[in-house]
Amino acid sequence: MLPHKAGQSCGYGRGSEKPAILTAVPHLPLVVNITVALALSLVGGLAARRLGLPTIVGYLLAGVAISPFSPVWVGDTEAIAQMAEFGVILLMFGIGLHFSFQELWRVRNISIPGAVVQMAIITALGAWLARRWGFSDGGAWVFGVAVSVASTIVLLRGLEDHGLLQSRHGKVAIGWLVFEDLATVAILVLLPTLVGQAEGPWWIPFWAVAKAVLFVGLMLVVGQRVVPAILERVVHTKSRELFILVALTLAAGTALASSALFGVSLALGAFVAGVVVSESKFSHQINADLLPFREAFAVLFFVSVGMLVNPSYVVEHWRQVLILSVLVVIVKGAVSAIIGFVSPYPARTALILGAGRGQMGEFSFIVGQAGLALGLLTTNQYSLILAGAIVSITINPLMFRLVEPAERWLQRFPTIWRILNREGAAAPLPAETLTGHIVVVGSGRVGRHISEVLTQLGVPRLVVEADPTRLKKLQSLGVPVLFGDAANSEILRHAGLERARALIVTLADDVAATSVVLSARAQAPELHVITRASTWHGARLLREAGADDIVRPELEGGVEIVRRTLLDLDLAIEDITRYTDLVRREDLADGDQPSPERSRVLQDLVQAAHHVAVQWFSVAPSSTLVGQSLATAAIRTRTGVSAVAIVREGTLTANPGPGHVLRVDDRVAVLGSPEQMAETERLFRGPDVPTDD
């Protein structure tokens, strides 16, 4: 899919010596290229995040750094492009996993006309600009189509970061994007005919479209019966490796088979495979298992795209880059917003459409690559598309942040606002109406129990969850919830942490939990943070990140065993609590030996076990204590023990006074030494009842 020039294999910069790493491992050129690409992507991604930009920008710039135009290092364009193809397959497969025909159909009244009208307007404007810049007729139209489409990854990330992914606005934006992607796939199939380069009879392109429709139909009808059965059989093997392998095979195998047998693109084949798998009960597990593969190979896709950018061309034609950026960010965003305003949706939906669609992305690159393959675009012209994508992706987070200020500004003009917001005010985000609430990150078993307790106590809570299945269940129960990954997005900014009473992090992954704690501390330094830790090292990291209370399930299990053992030894519960709290507090301290304080407390407990005991006795009918008050019974004078509690008919009296009169079957707790207990037992049983001595 990604074109390359002959001779642009793994190499080195102009006029420079061969890099030492290639000299050291000349038999592993592919490994070298991938390692260098990933390392530079890491650096670029970290720098982008530090600047508040999408990581995609860093990945694209990493590709520029190892492009054929680099003066230092030239990566193997063909090798990385082959790996990038797999990234496209996994990327589109993942999009298909989250696709829902039902959700799409619900927003068809805005998504279908919106996608068609916006693509038509922006394509025409883009083609007009391209013709003025000297593009051929065919190249101009390809350029226009590439400019008209938006990035799936960027839009989904923007919606997730702002807590909008499962909102009505987000569903409209996603539905629009899906219809746009489907339209783009059709254009790619018909492109050779549209530009007059198709070979054979005139009906060949339409036959290609028919085959694509046939493929989709077969997958939806037959695939939805066969794929779940295959997954069910693999699950019964109880092998996670085989489960991951079958998921990868479904993604890549379906994409390759669709391309070979039906002539559709790998991207469409993988997307349809994801849609089919999404109907299976194992879809969420597949999504979780393939996420690391998808993220890694998607990075290589963006690196391979960046390798095609000619920096010198971009610098020389900066005016064209600027004009293109205005067309994409402002004009395309404005057209999308206007379509949203004239549709029967809240004004915020239109503003989110305008902000989210003002960028270019994956399909822009794919359309541009098709233009290159057909000879309609030159490499330099394709660099212009890539430059526009980089600029628009960089600016897109800022556009999302302008949604709320724009909404407040429009509300200053009531007449205009009533015209634009015909449906009335949209429902606010969950956190916008909460104060003094508890934010719970994760709704697994631990998070679910916490949420149930808070519900019973009447304490407001907000759950942040990334699992779609749990999300639907929470929504059905009426629980306020934000959908998104708190560890890898900006979703916490919309949880109202500055107004919250506490944050509880129940994630099992210590790295993810640390990321959440760091983000929370940056937003609300005084917020009380309670988090779960899976390991001792993870607990140390969480403590350093700023967590106030850390709970380790493994440690808590050991502490509970110790507590129950000490209770069986009849030790004072206050001393047991003091010791177990000390164990928890010292768990994160350096060294394996207990501290002097902990040793002293334990020694006190042991001595108490030997010298002081609490024991319960029942007042027998024959006992001389019946009918006497504690003062006249003189239990302490006669035995040396002290009565500390009395239970009568299920009612406990702690520290009873001297006037308390004893009755038959009263249970009395006394405190004393083991030696004193024998005499006390005789007193409570009475003189006519023999003891066990």
Image (cartoon, rainbow, N blue to C red):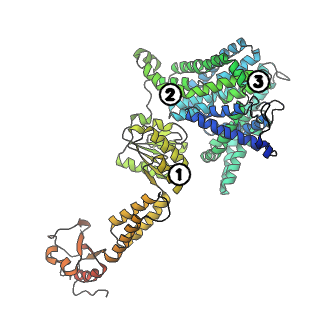
Residue at image point 75% right, 15% down: 135
Q: Is 508 left or right of 646, judged from the image as shown? A: right
- Please provide percent x and percent y for residue 232: 66, 52
What's the CA distance linking mark 3 and mark 2? Answer: 34 Å
What's the CA distance linking mark 3 and mark 1? Answer: 47 Å
**Marks 3, 1: nearer the viewer:** 3
Q: Which residue is mark 2?
A: 401
Q: Is 256 left or right of 241, judged from the image as shown? A: right
Q: Which residue is mark 1?
A: 508
Which label's residue is closer to the chain start, 2 or 1? 2
What's the CA distance linking mark 2 and mark 1? Answer: 31 Å
Residue at the far top in the pictured view: 132
Tell me if mark 1 has few (under 14), some (14-19) or many (20+) residues whose alpha carbon lies within 10 angstroms of its own. Answer: some
Which image quadrant is residue 581 in? bottom left
Q: Can see residue 601?
A: yes
Q: Amino acid at mark 1?
A: Ala
